[in-house]
Image: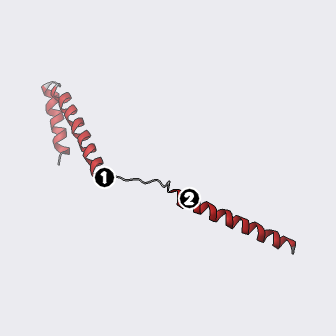
Amino acid sequence: MPCSAVTLSLATITAIVATALLAIAFSTDNWVYYEVRRNQIQIVQAGKQVEKFQLLEMKVFQLPIALRTEVDNLTDCHVK
């Protein structure tokens, strides 16, 4: 029966250490807090899309007229 006494003492010591670590974790209050502001992310992404479209328009405007009409026809199909 000495094995059960050793196991019981190890379990007791482990429980005391675990309780102490939990108390330290809750008392320090070093928890990480994340806040996601989806509206701001969507506004930023929309602005980037507008910039990309404006750059595309500038590049298309610099194309020769024959190619420009082909590109306009392609973009008209995809715009909703």
**5 or 44, which lies in front?**
5
Quick check: 9 above or below 66? below
User: Can you identify the residue that label 2 sits on?
Assistant: 25
Residue located at (22% from left, 31% from top): 55
**50 or 8, which lies in front?**
8
Residue located at (68% from left, 66% from top): 16
Q: CA distance from mark 1 to mark 2?
A: 31 Å
**56 or 73, which lies in front?**
56
Please state if 65 lies on the left or on the right of 47 as rendered.
left
- Where disc 1 sits, the SS reads helix
**Sequence order check, earlier mark of 1 and 2:** 2
Q: Residues within 10 Å of mark 1 (few under 14, many from 20)?
A: few
- Where disc 2 sits, the SS reads helix
Task: Specify the farthest residue to the bottom.
Answer: 1
Residue located at (84% from left, 70% from top): 3
Q: Kindly identify which numbered label has been placed on residue 38.
A: 1
Residue located at (15% from left, 30% from top): 68
Percent position of residue 46, x then y:
24, 44
Please state if 23 lies on the left or on the right of 31 as rendered.
right
